[in-house]
Amino acid sequence: MVDPKNPGIIDEIINLGNYWNQTKLLESKERIILLSNRASRLYKIAYSNLKEAKVARDEWASYYSNSIDLAKINEITYKLKNKIFKDVVPQFIKYPTLRQGFASANTPEGLVHFFDSILQDVHKVIAIKGDPGTGKGKVMEALLNGGISLGLDGEGYYCPLNHDKLELIYWPALSTAVLRINEYLKYSPGYLPNIKVFEEINFNKFVNADKIDLYKDEIANAKERFAENHKRALQKLAQVKATRTELEKCYVKAMDFNTINDKRDELYKRILSYGENI
């Protein structure tokens, strides 16, 4: 629920509760309460599973973060900065704009993304992949800050499971993006109409094999726990959707859609009239 900042002047609330038949709605009272409680409980279970999945993923990442060659991470950061920003002329007239958000989400349909929509105008995509903890996040943060220091407007999109981790960076002026992918979030730029270069870099090659091999059993266990909890969370979200669909049916049969349509037409005409007065 978002309260209007300037009610009656700039903002307006349309209460669709004014258009239902109270008597018909009360006929479904017990079912509405049961379904609402079930949806709420399923949401809590899903969020609990996502939290457990993150704990497992953080443990998984910890083994790799202690086994990576940090000098190599510095080297790849340096090379990527030179490759991406080599023709950029720094500007210090205005501070750059950084748009932040999410490009993927855990949904009832599974893990979905909107990369194709965001990257319609991109010419070059650099995809970095590897196990959690292999330094991908460090490199992406350095690249994002590098663009900002040069005065470049950019877009930064974050991981839905870990809001501190960048998943996608896009610089519109360069038509270039850096994307973090993994076995759960795969991507092929086949639907991008302007793509010219698609490059993949596997960060697992920066891992010390002897060090990481000592924890292969713990890593396997953490990966299994992550997969189980993530899968169960998505299943619960799908059950939430099914439950809310049943809940909506209770309200649909009690709604006066003819009056709602009249209200819609009224709002549409009013919106059009604002344009005429500009």
Image (cartoon, rainbow, N blue to C red):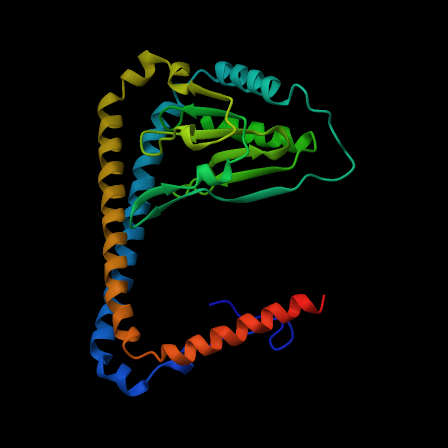
Q: Quadrant of residue 121?
A: top right
Q: Position of residue 277 (x, y in %)?
A: 71, 69
**63 lies left or right of 220:** right
**145 lies left or right of 64:** right
Q: Quadrant of residue 54?
A: top left
Report the quarter where the C terminus lies. Answer: bottom right
The residue positioned 43% from the left and 29% from the top of the image is 189
**154 lies left or right of 14:** right
**Residue closer to the observer: 83 or 48:** 83
**101 lies left or right of 227:** right
**Residue closer to the observer: 22 or 106:** 22
Q: Position of residue 62 (x, y in %)?
A: 36, 29
**Residue closer to the observer: 139 or 189:** 189
Is residue 138 placed above or below 79 in the rendered structure?
below
Q: Position of residue 132 (x, y in %)?
A: 37, 29
Q: Position of residue 153 (x, y in %)?
A: 65, 37
